[in-house]
Image (spheres, coloured by chain):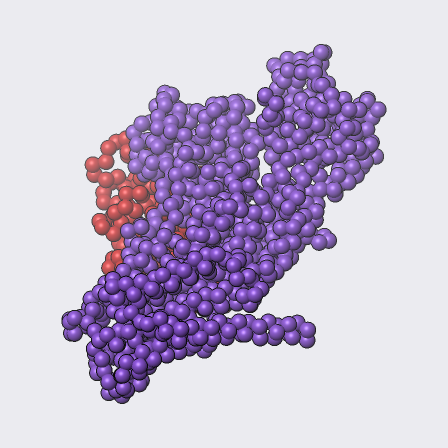
Chain colours: A purple, B red
């Protein structure tokens, strides 16, 4: 039988314990058997193993191969400068590994924060004696003593209690204290009222309990286990980068092999083919891509922080842009978390809060059956209590009546009751959910007097309740009873709530945040589904959902208890419906909803603030913690922290995330154009038996030098105007798609290559070179020609950066000066190119030679041609899109 | 299938917890149960007393539940003695508890639990009891790999335990994720995964249907041991029933051993069944 259903004697027998607790030697045996009572880390791959993994993926292996070939060729043909190339490639591998690791690495401290919620010592009875000992030494069967202020150290079954109330917030998210008892309970273990769970705080009373689960086997440990072990997997961007690098690596390998074979058949020497193989690898691999992606994400996270969304893991910056579903809390996120009394019903009349003035008993109950306090002009306590205290305090001064007894609010009973001293005897006040209060009432207040409540009165009360909830108000019922007895000793807990008089109903509202309506509309336009998950009742949830535009017409409401009865398949079907709202939910349901949505292929963002939200936050593609109301554990588990707890901030961050993905795509196009331009000279070298027009070090000068800052500046492009009216990108949409590849391989790349080759042959021909003549690597003419080739590519890249600023909009549409970083990037690119061409150090490192200014002028038209081609393509594409829209 | 059940008890509290699963199985199978304690030669008297008390308690519980029961207390080598009893009394399955010490030493030194699972002539259920508040399982998780031996016996065991406790069974399979060279991991929807349920898993579910056991199935691609412990923790399962590992020591070193991993990190009680009945 479950531990909560056992009698006190059965509990001791099943756990082989007794009233005197465990014997020390038995406790030691159990300690050895069950281990220490502590939160342990789930075993994970260590950083020492994860970091080397960055050096062994497919692309890295290809680069290692390139480096190996470079070193080998230095052995075969010393003095060709291949050693420095080998080291340069190794440098690229290390840089890429470090940047990839920075993206992946995230300090994990959520378990550390969880551990802080457990106490350090506990009072326990062993061998019949009470002693204080470290919590770590607690074992199943130990008899522990709980009193006010204690933190519960392990899951334990109560065997005696005296008005013991605990706050289970770390486990349930419910901030109200719960009254525990020691009798057998037929409820589920987790909702049982005779179990004290680890991590809970004793708010009042005292009790004794027998420990039945310790450490990671407690409910608290379960959350820790899930928080530590659950992972969202690779982010969409990481997956795309894996796919892209594999595609590039495959292309590089194929091109290398095919042209190696061609070279062999047309009589090229092994050495020439060898150079070619290395060159192809280096030319096709965008060495600067990973560092640029990382820096671009870092810049994105800075921009998001400026919009009150603090990003903890760099990869999550882009993940937001892929989000297809946002599961959001209601209170505080969609609403302002500022409860206000809006309507009340008393004496058969409905009215505004000023009506409190005319209902003494209603105001008294609202004021005295209330745990909020006003200290130094500041209200402290539960938002509902504060709203009632404010409303009551504003209309009348309620005499102070000493509270002599209290039954705290209990989510199961859905009410709280106090007994306060009165002039004659005492008064019982109750407030709570109408379905909890109405059955207690035998009388109703009419014209200031309590009269017997008949069916008509009950019907009127229910009608008023429905009318108030229909307006989206949270409705509480208030009842009272006069007692002759004035002493606390006379109180019989089971009796005081009987035969009460209904004083009235009060409807409270937590108004939606004003900016939420617009944010919800924006999400709809962007094809993002919003699922509201709230602990409130279905009517309140529906009204709020309607008010903020989340649903239109009758929402589809699913309540917590219905969800628990559903199989995964049925719940999946419901999750695919639109206008779905979850009401009466607890945080434990979130993980299931998030898991199922992910199984359905959705990219899920979820909000959370409580300790037990942590697993769902970890499981989601992006977990979003509340910066103001969130616990430390939730903040540690999340990837993003909302500094203002505002739903609209999530939507802003999604927009920023989408922009970042667009920008990454832009600079990948930009890098690939130069890669094609670097590859074509190698093909010419193999196929037409000419000297190599571009050396491998010059390829690296472009990929890791001149391209870097303009590429990074593309990462700072502002979001396009239509970004949030497009649907989220599909799972099959690639970072490098056919459209982009054809643009790069068939239009932009060839023009750029033509610029480079034109420069090369212009210098060679004007220097007296004739076809078939081979020049040594140190020959000045040859060096000058390769420098011209490099300059042609760099100049064309200057034009290309403007083309890549937008896939759709011509430059005139986005503004020449709208991204000043681009201009700074181009300035850097040109200064670096001047250094490479004209400075002796640049000449020495990159085997270049100064070229006359006239060569630059000859190359300039190619840059203009590339710019014109790119812009004309956009205009044609825009025209075609317009035609399509017209024909539709 | 099970007409005789033996529960091995010792001085440790978890052996008593483990024996309660044997009681439930014996009751569901209308089998007789032998509750035995084999005292080692040098065992201190206090330990013997504890074990004897446990035997007495369990015997009384069996009688109260109307299960034909017998209690035995002997001295000697536990494995040899239990093997002897199993042969003489026609025992079909032996329940023994596996301890934390066993989990840590498992492959590196011969433990009693390991010897029992290897040397007994009948099926062996090794129970790792980590949660003393969940001895009455409401939800039982049964992880299965793609190819399983003794399908009928395993389904019978899980089905009868579920019947004994009126529990709900969740059949769990963690298939290998599908990957493509250019696509990385390919995401399949649950419906698509269900079309790929291995034949042995289907056969197992067919057997459960035959025994009229209420169950649901769950497929979660990924690492088996992590998937099992996460599923057990997330859905608050009270008991996991796994088949014994068939991996050799070198294979376990190279490929890992999901049974060993779950044994170490299980969030709830765990039974590892070494089935010996033919299909």
Asked which quadrant contains residue A439, the reply is top right
What x and y, as percent, mark residue A739? 50, 73
Query: Which part of the image, by quadrant, shows the C terminus of chain A?
Result: bottom right
Would you place residue B164 above or below residue A511 in this image? below
Q: Where residue A308 appears, x then y in whole percent? A: 52, 44
Residue A561 shows up from this direction: no
- Coordinates of residue A160 in the picture (x, y in percent): 49, 25
Q: In the drawing, does residue A548 fall left or right of residue A47?
A: right
Q: Residue at 19% across / 72% down in the picture? A: A80
Relative to A584, B97 lies left or right? left
Residue sitting nearer the eye, B152 or B31 = B152
Q: Position of residue A89 (x, y in %)?
A: 27, 64
Q: Which image quarter: residue A700? A: bottom left
Q: Nearer the viewer, residue A428 or A109?
A: A109
**Which of the two residues, A793 or A85, is positioned nearer the viewer here?**
A793
> Considering only vertical position in the picture, is B31 above or below A382?
below
Q: Against A506, is B161 above or below?
A: below
């Amino acid at each position: 039988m479950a531990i909560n259903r056992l009698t006190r004697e059965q509990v001791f027998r099943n756990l082989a314990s007794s009233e005197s607790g465990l014997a020390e030697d038995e406790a030691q045996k159990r300690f050895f058997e069950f281990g220490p009572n502590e939160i342990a880390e789930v075993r994970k791959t260590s950083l020492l193993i994860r970091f080397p993994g960055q050096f062994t993926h497919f692309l890295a292996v290809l680069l290692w191969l390139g480096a190996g070939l470079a070193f080998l060729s230095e052995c075969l043909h010393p003095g060709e400068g291949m050693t420095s190339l080998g080291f340069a490639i190794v440098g690229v591998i290390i840089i890429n590994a470090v940047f990839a690791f920075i993206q992946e690495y995230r300090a994990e401290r959520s378990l550390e924060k969880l551990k802080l919620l457990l106490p350090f010592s506990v009072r326990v009875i062993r061998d019949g004696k009470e002693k204080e000992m470290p919590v770590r030494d607690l074992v199943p069967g130990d008899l522990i003593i709980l009193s006010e202020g204690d933190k519960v150290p392990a899951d334990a079954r109560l065997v005696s209690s005296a008005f013991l109330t605990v706050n289970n917030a770390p486990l349930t998210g419910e901030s109200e204290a719960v009254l525990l008892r020691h009798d057998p309970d037929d409820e589920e273990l987790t909702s049982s009222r005779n179990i004290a769970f680890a991590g809970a705080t004793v708010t009042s009373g005292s009790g004794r309990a027998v420990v039945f689960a310790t450490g990671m086997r407690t409910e608290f440990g379960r959350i820790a286990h899930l928080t530590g072990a659950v992972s969202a997997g690779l982010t969409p961007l990481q997956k795309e980068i894996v796919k892209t690098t594999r595609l590039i690596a495959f292309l590089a390998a194929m091109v290398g092999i095919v042209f190696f074979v061609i070279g062999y058949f047309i009589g090229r020497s092994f050495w020439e083919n060898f150079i070619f193989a290395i060159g192809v690898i280096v030319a096709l691999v965008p060495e600067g891509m990973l560092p640029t992606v990382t820096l671009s994400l870092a810049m994105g996270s800075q921009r998001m922080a400026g919009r009150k969304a603090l990003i903890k893991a760099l990869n999550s910056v882009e993940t937001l842009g892929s989000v297809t579903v946002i599961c959001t809390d209601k209170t505080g996120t969609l609403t302002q978390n500022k409860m206000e009394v809006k309507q009340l019903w008393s004496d058969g009349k409905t009215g505004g809060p000023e009506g409190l003035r005319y209902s003494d008993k209603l105001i008294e109950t609202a004021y005295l059956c209330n745990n909020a306090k006003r200290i130094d002009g500041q209200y402290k306590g539960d938002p509902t209590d504060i709203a009632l205290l404010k409303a009551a305090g504003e209309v009348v001064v309620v005499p102070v009546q000493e509270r002599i007894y209290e039954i705290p609010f209990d989510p199961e009973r859905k009410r709280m009751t106090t007994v306060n001293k009165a002039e004659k005897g005492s008064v019982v006040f109750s407030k709570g959910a109408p379905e909890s209060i109405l059955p207690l009432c035998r009388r109703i207040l009419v014209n200031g007097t309590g009269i017997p409540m008949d069916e008509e009165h009950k019907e009127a009360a229910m009608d008023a309740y429905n009318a108030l909830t229909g307006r989206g108000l949270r409705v509480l019922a208030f009842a009272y009873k006069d007692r002759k007895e004035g002493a606390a000793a006379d109180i019989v807990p089971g009796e005081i709530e009987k035969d009460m008089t209904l004083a009235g109903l009060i409807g409270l509202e937590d108004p939606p945040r004003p900016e939420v309506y617009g944010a919800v509309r924006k999400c709809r336009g962007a094809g993002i589904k919003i699922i509201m998950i709230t602990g409130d009742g279905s009517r309140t949830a529906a009204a709020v959902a309607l008010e903020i535009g989340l649903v239109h017409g009758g929402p589809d409401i699913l309540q917590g208890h219905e969800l628990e009865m559903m199989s995964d398949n049925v719940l999946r079907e419901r999750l695919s419906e639109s206008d779905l709202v979850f009401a009466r939910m607890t945080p434990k349901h979130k993980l299931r909803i998030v898991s199922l949505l992910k199984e359905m292929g959705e990219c899920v963002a979820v909000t959370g603030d409580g300790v037990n939200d942590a697993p769902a936050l970890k499981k989601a593609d992006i977990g979003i913690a509340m910066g103001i109301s969130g616990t430390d554990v939730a903040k540690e588990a999340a990837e993003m922290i909302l500094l203002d707890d505002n739903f609209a901030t999530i939507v802003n961050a999604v927009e920023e995330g989408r922009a970042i993905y667009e920008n990454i795509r832009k600079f990948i196009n930009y890098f690939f154009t130069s890669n094609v331009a670097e590859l074509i000279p190698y093909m010419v070298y193999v196929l037409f038996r000419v000297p190599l027009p571009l050396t491998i070090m010059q390829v690296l000068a472009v990929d890791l030098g001149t391209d870097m800052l303009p590429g990074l500046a593309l990462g700072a492009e502002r979001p396009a105007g239509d970004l949030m009216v497009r649907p989220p990108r599909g799972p099959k949409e690639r970072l490098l798609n056919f459209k982009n590849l054809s643009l790069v391989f068939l239009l932009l790349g060839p023009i750029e290559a033509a610029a480079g080759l034109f420069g090369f042959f212009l210098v060679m021909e004007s220097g007296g070179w004739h076809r078939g003549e081979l020049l040594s690597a140190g020959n000045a003419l040859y060096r000058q020609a390769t420098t011209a080739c490099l300059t042609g590519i760099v100049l064309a890249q200057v034009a290309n950066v403007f083309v890549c600023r937008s896939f759709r909009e011509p430059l005139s549409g986005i503004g020449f000066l709208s991204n000043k970083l681009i201009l700074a990037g181009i300035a850097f690119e040109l200064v670096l190119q001047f250094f490479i061409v004209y400075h002796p150090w640049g000449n020495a490192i990159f085997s270049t030679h100064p070229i006359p200014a006239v060569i630059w002028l000859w190359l300039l038209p190619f840059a203009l041609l590339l710019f014109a081609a790119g812009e004309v393509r956009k205009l044609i594409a825009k025209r075609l899109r317009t035609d399509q829209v017209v024909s539709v | 299938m099970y007409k005789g059940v033996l529960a091995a008890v010792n001085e440790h509290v978890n052996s008593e917890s483990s024996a309660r699963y044997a009681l439930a199985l014996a009751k569901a199978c209308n089998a007789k149960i032998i509750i035995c304690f084999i005292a080692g030669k040098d065992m201190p008297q206090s330990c013997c007393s504890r074990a004897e008390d446990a035997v007495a308690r369990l015997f009384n519980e069996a009688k109260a539940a109307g299960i034909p029961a017998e209690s035995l207390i002997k001295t000697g080598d536990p494995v040899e003695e239990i093997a002897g009893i199993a042969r003489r009394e026609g025992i079909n399955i032996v329940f023994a508890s596996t301890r934390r010490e066993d989990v840590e030493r498992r492959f590196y030194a011969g433990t009693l639990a390991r010897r029992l699972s290897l040397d007994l002539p009948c099926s062996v259920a090794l129970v790792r009891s980590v949660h003393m508040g969940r001895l009455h399982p409401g939800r039982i998780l049964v992880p299965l790999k793609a190819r399983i031996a003794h399908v009928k016996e395993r389904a019978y065991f899980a089905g009868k335990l579920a019947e004994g406790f009126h529990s709900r069974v969740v059949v769990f399979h963690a298939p290998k994720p599908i990957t493509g060279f250019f696509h990385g991991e390919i995401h399949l929807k649950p419906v698509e995964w269900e079309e790929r349920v291995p034949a042995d898993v289907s056969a197992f579910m067919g057997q459960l249907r035959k025994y009229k056991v209420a169950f649901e199935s769950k497929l979660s691609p990924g690492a088996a041991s992590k998937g099992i412990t996460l599923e057990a923790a997330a859905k608050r399962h009270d008991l996991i029933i796994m088949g014994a590992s068939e991996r050799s020591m070198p294979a376990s070193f190279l490929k890992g051993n999901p049974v060993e991993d779950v044994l170490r990190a299980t969030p709830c009680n765990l039974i590892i069944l070494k089935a010996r009945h033919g299909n």
